[in-house]
Image: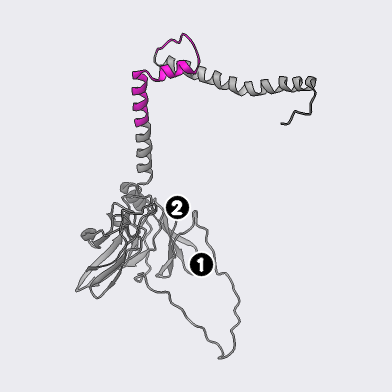
Amino acid sequence: MDVSHLNPETLVNYQSLIIPTVMIPLTAVMVALSMLASFIAGLFGIRLKSEGPRRLLEVLLKPKVLLSALVLNILVLGGIQLYTHIKNRPTMLWRIEKEARDKAKPSDRSYENYHSVPGEHSVGAGVAGQPRQQEFKAGWSQKLPKGSFRSPIFSGGSVFVGSFDGFVYELDAESGAILRSFFVGTPVTPELMIDDGVLYVGEGVHDTHSARIYAFDLRTGRLKGAYSTKGHTEGQPVMAEHQWQKLMFVVAGSDGIHAVDPQTFKAKWTANDGYIDSSVRVMNGRVFAGTGREKGDTEKNRSYAVAYDF
């Protein structure tokens, strides 16, 4: 503030206001440091002869205080790491099995296989050369608690959609009514797959580890089996056959590709040439995939287009 235009008497008045204004926060800091020093000293049975920042530094530099601080930091950081690890784990399998038993609803619908295929487009009848007039009309809507990340799939007159609330919902394709739900507990991020009356469900986001692929029997509504990985199963599982052998290909982020027997849920082979999120494609006895890098990673994982023998 420019005070050059003020007379001496006025300047004295302003100075008397400025000095307390500056000293108040400094005094507060000094008092806070003194209180902190007294508190820390009390924790270790130390009696302070004087107060202030200098004595606080003396207290903090004592060997038992430094050792205690080191141990406390290790415990805190270890606790944070443990919490993060547990938070990003999938739901315990026993809980999923229990939910499936308790809430299973059998169905007498006939479910066709639904694999990842290009979308079908139909052209309605119209008069050549004349544009068709279309009127949009919503058939039905059904609110999902936390929305859906991937496209729904269709089979047996039902719509199946995975949600971020950890459920897969089966809706009636005509009315939109929820027929039943399948619980996995972790966000259902990949597109679903149906094969031989079995619904295959992946899970997880980038921070998820030890994610699984779940198989639900659509006839009984119960969990048929599960296959565990070390990564997250964000890419859609792919079912393919070659030379009378049927395998399900699971992608698991930093854990690579897993070729799994869908009957036993055991791995036939695994390969890891880099981080992979996208589904594989199978043709002529070869499994094609593209590998990339995990977010924030610039060197660890290589980026390739790769082909494996079935």
Residue 178 is inside the magenta segment: no
Looking at the image, tell me whether mark 2 or mark 1 is earlier in sequence order.
2
Image coordinates of residue 271 in percent, x first then y, are 24, 60
Q: Is residue 252 left or right of residue 155?
A: left
Query: Which residue is painted at 41% across and 17% down in the image?
Result: 59
Identify the image quadrant of the N terminus: top right
Please give left or right for residue 125 compared with residue 44 in the image: right
Report the quarter where the C terminus lies: bottom left
User: At 38% across and 20% down in the image, what residue appears?
Assistant: 61
Query: In the image, residue 170 lies at what x, y percent?
Result: 43, 62
Q: Are marks 2 and 1 in contact (CB under 8 Å)?
A: no
Q: Which residue is mark 1?
A: 175
> Badge 2, how many Cα within 10 Å: few under 14, some, many 20+?
some
Q: Label 1 neighbourhood size at 10 Å, few (<14), some (14-19), many (20+)?
A: few
What segment carries the magenta color?
45-74
> Residue at coordinates 37% horizontally, 58% vertically from top-left?
234
Q: Is residue 112 visible?
A: yes
Q: Secondary structure at mark 2?
A: loop
Query: Foreground residue, 109 or 111?
Result: 111
**Residue 51 inside the magenta-drawn segment:** yes
Q: Amino acid at mark 2?
A: Asp
Q: Residue at x 49, y 54 (%)?
A: 146
Residue assigned mark 2:
165
SS type, badge 1: loop
**Nearest to the observer: residue 101 or residue 185:** 185
